[in-house]
């Protein structure tokens, strides 16, 4: 059957605005966030209801057309991008963006999977509650994509990743079956936890169409501090001190090196005057929903202890909302700062907290002996053992050629180091199309076999995002 016949079949299923087959419009969906790869498709479908998603999947399955689910297309590993065959359609959830229900008593929110993260946060806040998932892309990423990648972000140290916030799910399987499990239950031991299969599945098991997320009390007080680290400050010990002495009120513990701060400052209109210490900076924040806690006093006491221990040179406590915003803006502008300079080769590693310092030491020597002229931008969610250990693309150099060179050489050395320390090559950004070879290289054989069995059970014909992450059994090698 020709592609135009397929397009007609999909037009019959969706109303006028639901099928995009104009090449110019399609082009905005086929390149990945980092602009490393452009795929090909004959149509982007934008269903408006779960039934339409199920109808699309049934037709696609009958015609052996592959499906790539897409949310905000902000992910970093090419998982939301179709391959070059032109045989996969993109199913964008952008028209399914309703907030279905906020339940302040159960402390949950039910949404369409195409809802933009920021809109879900705002809906929760309007009801006096917090959706504790926050990341730089929150203005454009969508809940289905957050589930697909198990997004982490800036408050994992307190609230966990997307996985920890998911109470219920609605999803369409590869034969059009709808899983309707939009329950608000914290406890439900009635067999396999199917919703968790979709978390981090990167569109390879089905299309998530709805989700119920757990909310928390909305903080009304925050204490935000900029810690100037002493040279070789022990990050894990500092984190342990801050957690213990704050009675775990810590919501953020973000590490930034001076280079990353400088990149962010260059990209900001009004950068604050704060500087890093000799060992970098930690942005730490306490948050509380209680009026009765003196968070500033608590933060001052904790910082005094850290200064006394010699781990920090100095610290600034934000004295106003605008000072807090400025500190946060520095952290959140780092990816943009890297991009403006000519981009970076990203290494989203994590190691056990006890090995963070060791990783920094070993990786530093590896970079110096690979090429002493390379510049790094190192920052990340150290509270979660997660570092963005990024190699900056030198200005004027071809970004893609440089990325390929680093990824086939130095990157593997860095990942080997993370693996030797019992860490991982992808802490939060996923596997997608770009990191499949790393999953094969570093993944436990038994774990990959189990992943392939799950893929086979959900999607034996490999309709759902074929070419991303893992293949079903009987379809060649793992990836
Ligand atoms: P997409 O990129 O559209 O898709 C991601 C994957 O999920 C794809 O494999 C796709 O097929 C699948 N998918 C999408 N929708 C569905 C669905 N409805 N059903 C099934 N599968 C689906 N990530 C973090 O974890 N922490 C951060 O701090 C962070 N910061 C970022 C900052 C910036 C500036 C940017 C650009 C990105 C950042 N990211 C971060 C990465 C990215 O934002 C997250 O991975 C996000 O969760 C992706 O959501 P999305 O809607 O854009 O998904
Ligand atoms: C972040 O933490 O800012 C992102 O995950 C890293 C990035 O955007 O490169
Ligand atoms: Zn991150």
Image (cartoon, rainbow, N blue to C red):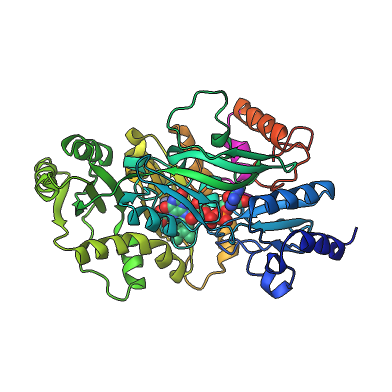
In the rendered image, residue 407, in percent from the top left (x then y), is placed at 56, 52
Quarter of the image for residue 3 reads bottom right
The residue under the point 64% across, 65% down is: 29
* Magenta-highlighted residues: 430-444
In the rendered image, residue 371, in percent from the top left (x then y), is placed at 46, 56
Closer to us: 185 or 365: 185
The residue under the point 15% across, 54% down is: 315
The residue under the point 41% across, 60% down is: 375
The quarter in which the C terminus is drawn is top right
Whether residue 330 is visible to the viewer of this picture, yes or no, is yes
For residue 275, above or below residue 176: below
Q: Is residue 389 left or right of residue 287?
A: right
Quarter of the image for residue 117 reads bottom left
Q: Is residue 247 left or right of residue 78?
A: left
Closer to us: 417 or 153: 153
Q: Is residue 154 left or right of residue 272?
A: right
In the rendered image, residue 47, in percent from the top left (x then y), is placed at 66, 58
Whether residue 390 is visible to the viewer of this picture, yes or no, is no
Closer to us: 345 or 110: 110
In the rendered image, residue 467, in percent from the top left (x then y), is placed at 70, 47
The residue under the point 32% across, 49% down is: 129
The quarter in which the N terminus is drawn is bottom right
For residue 267, above or below residue 147: below
């Amino acid at each position: 059957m020709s592609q135009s016949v397929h397009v007609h079949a999909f037009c019959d299923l969706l109303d006028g605005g639901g099928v995009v087959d104009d090449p110019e419009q399609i082009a905005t969906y086929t390149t990945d966030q980092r602009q490393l790869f452009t795929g090909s498709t004959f149509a982007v479908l934008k269903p408006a209801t779960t039934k339409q998603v199920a109808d699309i999947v049934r037709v696609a399955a009958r015609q052996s057309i592959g499906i790539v689910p897409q949310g905000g297309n902000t992910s970093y590993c090419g998982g939301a991008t179709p391959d070059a065959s032109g045989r996969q359609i993109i199913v964008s959830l952008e028209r399914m963006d309703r907030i279905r229900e906020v339940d302040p008593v159960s402390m949950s929110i039910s949404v369409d999977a195409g809802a933009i993260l920021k809109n879900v946060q705002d809906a929760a806040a309007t009801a006096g509650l917090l959706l504790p998932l926050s990341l730089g892309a929150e203005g454009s990423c969508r809940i289905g994509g957050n589930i697909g990648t198990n997004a982490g972000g800036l408050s994992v140290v307190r609230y966990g990743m997307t996985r920890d916030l998911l109470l219920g799910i609605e999803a369409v399987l590869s034969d059009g079956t709808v899983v309707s499990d939009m329950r608000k239950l914290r406890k439900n031991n009635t067999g396999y936890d199917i919703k968790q299969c979709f978390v981090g599945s990167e569109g390879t098991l089905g299309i998530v169409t709805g989700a119920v997320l757990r909310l928390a009390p909305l903080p009304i007080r925050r204490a935000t501090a900029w810690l100037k680290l002493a040279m070789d400050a022990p990050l894990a010990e500092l984190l342990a001190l801050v957690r213990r002495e704050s009675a775990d009120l810590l919501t953020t513990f973000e590490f930034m090196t001076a280079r990353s701060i400088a990149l962010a400052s260059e990209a900001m209109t009004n950068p604050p005057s704060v500087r890093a210490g000799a060992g970098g900076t930690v942005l730490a924040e306490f948050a509380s929903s209680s009026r009765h806690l003196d968070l500033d006093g608590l933060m001052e006491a904790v910082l005094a202890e850290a200064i006394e221990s010699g781990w920090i040179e100095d610290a600034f406590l934000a004295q106003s909302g605008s000072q807090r915003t400025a500190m946060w803006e520095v952290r959140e502008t780092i990816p943009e700062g890297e991009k403006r300079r000519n981009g970076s080769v990203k290494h989203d590693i994590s190691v056990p907290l006890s090995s963070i310092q060791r990783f920094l030491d070993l990786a530093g020597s590896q970079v110096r002996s690979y090429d002493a002229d390379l510049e790094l931008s190192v920052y990340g969610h150290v509270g979660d053992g997660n570092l963005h250990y990024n190699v900056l693309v030198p200005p004027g150099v071809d970004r893609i050629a440089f990325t390929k060179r680093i990824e086939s050489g130095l990157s593997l050395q860095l990942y080997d180091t993370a693996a030797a320390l019992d860490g991982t090559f992808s802490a939060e950004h996923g596997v997608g199309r770009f990191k499949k070879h790393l999953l094969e290289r570093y993944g436990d054989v038994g774990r990959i076999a189990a992943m392939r069995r799950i893929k086979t059970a959900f999607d034996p014909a490999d309709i759902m995002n074929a070419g991303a992450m893992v293949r079903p059994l009987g379809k060649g090698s793992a990836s």
